[in-house]
Image (spheres, grey):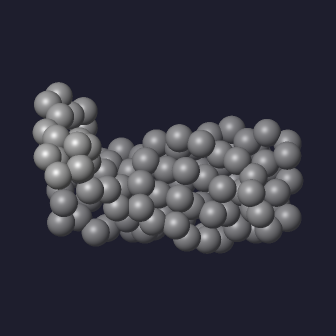
């Protein structure tokens, strides 16, 4: 199940692009089904299953125009799991190449329709 969702960045590429950081409670959680909506100039990411608003942000005029034109937005999601992804206090080097180990993160990119209220 989704614990928290944070909108880290909103910019315009070909269409409106929204970067999300999604924290899950368990590595076996697969239930993240976002729906996107715009009310006024507020962009909201909600859960399809519960309908609860997970995150929202105010759009400027240029971003609002882009989302109204395309009626969709590109979501770039970075999934993280509590207990697995956090701050690494001890860096464990890989002896073979001299670099520090990184924890695996799952990234997801999709185009989602936007509803207007």
Q: Nearer the viewer, residue 33 or 77?
A: 77
What residue occupies the far top of the structure in this picture? 89
x and y percentages locating residue 91 in the rendered image: 17, 34
x and y percentages locating residue 12 in the rendered image: 75, 52
114 relative position to 77: left or right: right
Identified at 46% across, 42% down, the residue is: 6
78 relative position to 61: left or right: left
35 relative position to 29: left or right: right
Q: Nearer the viewer, residue 82 or 49?
A: 82
x and y percentages locating residue 114 in the rendered image: 67, 65
Could one spot residue 86 in this view of the protein? yes
Q: Quadrant of the C terminus?
A: bottom right
Q: Nearer the viewer, residue 109 or 36?
A: 109
Q: Nearer the viewer, residue 59 or 12?
A: 12
x and y percentages locating residue 76 in the rendered image: 53, 59
Identified at 24% across, 38% down, the residue is: 86
Instruction: In the rendered view, tell whether residue 37 sits above or below residue 111.
Output: above
Q: Quadrant of the N terminus?
A: bottom left
Identified at 79% across, 68% down, the residue is: 70
Identified at 74% across, 57% down, the residue is: 13
Instruction: In the rendered view, tell whether residue 79 sits above or below residue 95.
Output: below
Instruction: In the rendered view, tell whether residue 112 sits above or below residue 58.
Output: below
Quadrant assignment, res 72: bottom right
Instruction: In the rendered view, tell whether residue 59 sits above or below residue 78.
Output: above
């Amino acid at each position: 199940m989704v614990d928290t969702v944070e909108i880290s960045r909103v910019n315009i590429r070909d269409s409106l692009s929204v970067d999300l950081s999604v924290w899950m409670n368990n590595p076996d959680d697969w239930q993240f089904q976002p729906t996107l909506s715009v009310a006024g100039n507020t962009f909201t990411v909600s859960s399809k299953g519960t309908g609860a608003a997970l995150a929202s942000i105010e759009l400027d005029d240029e971003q609002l125009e882009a989302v109204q034109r395309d009626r969709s937005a590109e979501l770039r999601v970075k999934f993280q799991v509590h207990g697995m992804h956090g701050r690494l206090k001890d860096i464990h080097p890989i002896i073979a190449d001299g670099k520090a180990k990184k924890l695996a993160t799952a990234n997801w990119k999709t185009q989602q329709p936007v509803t207007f209220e």
